[in-house]
Image: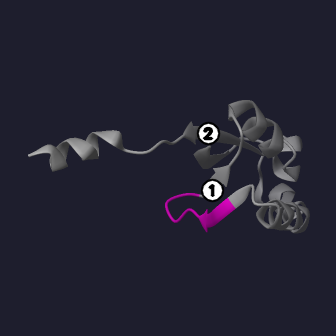
Amino acid sequence: MKMLVLSRMLPAASPEAVNSKLADEARGGWELYKAGFIREWYFRTDQPGVVLMIEAANMEEARATLATSPLAQAGFIEFDVIPLGAYLPLETLFAR
C-alpha cells in the first residue's frame, strides 16, 4: 500500500538537538530507501521536515517502521501517515 508521510517537528526539536541526530537519521532513511520502504524522499520548503512516499503492507507496519527513526525515538519528530489508493472515479469520464 502506498502512503504519503508528512513529518512535523515537535517542541523539543531545537536545531542543536536535531543536528546531533541528523547523521543517524540520514543513515536510517537510506537503509529504508534501499529496502523499498521509502520510495520518494523530499525536504519541505514551507517548514522544517520531510515528505515521504512509502510502501508498507498496512498502517501498523508504516507507523512501526517510522517509529524507528532516530528523530522520532528522541521525541523530536512525529509523522502524519496518509494511505493512498487509485483514483477510481476517473473511469466515469470515459463512459461518455
Give the magenta part as a residue range: 39-47
Residue lying at 36% horizontally and 44% vertically, measured from the top left: 87
Near mark 2 (Cα within 10 A), the count class, few <14, some 14-19 or many ≥20, is some
Near mark 1 (Cα within 10 A), the count class, few <14, some 14-19 or many ≥20, is many
Q: Position of residue 58 (x, y in %)?
A: 69, 34
Residue lying at 86% horizontally and 64% vertically, measured from the top left: 31
Residue where numbered disc 1 is placed: 52
Residue at the top extreme of this rendering: 60
Q: Position of residue 53 (x, y in %)?
A: 61, 55
**In the displayed structure image, the side of residue 16 where residue 43 appears, left or right:** left
**In the displayed structure image, the side of residue 93 where residue 78 appears, left or right:** right
Residue at the left extreme of this rendering: 96
Q: Which SS class for mark 1?
A: strand
- Whether 57 is drawn above or below 26: the answer is above
Q: Position of residue 6 (x, y in %)?
A: 59, 48
Instruction: Please name whichever residue, 67 or 11, is drawn nearer the observer in this view of the structure.
Output: 67
Residue lying at 77% horizontally and 64% vertically, measured from the top left: 33
Q: Earlier in the sequence, mark 2 or mark 1?
A: 1
Q: Position of residue 52 (x, y in %)?
A: 63, 56
Say which amino acid is labelled 1: Leu
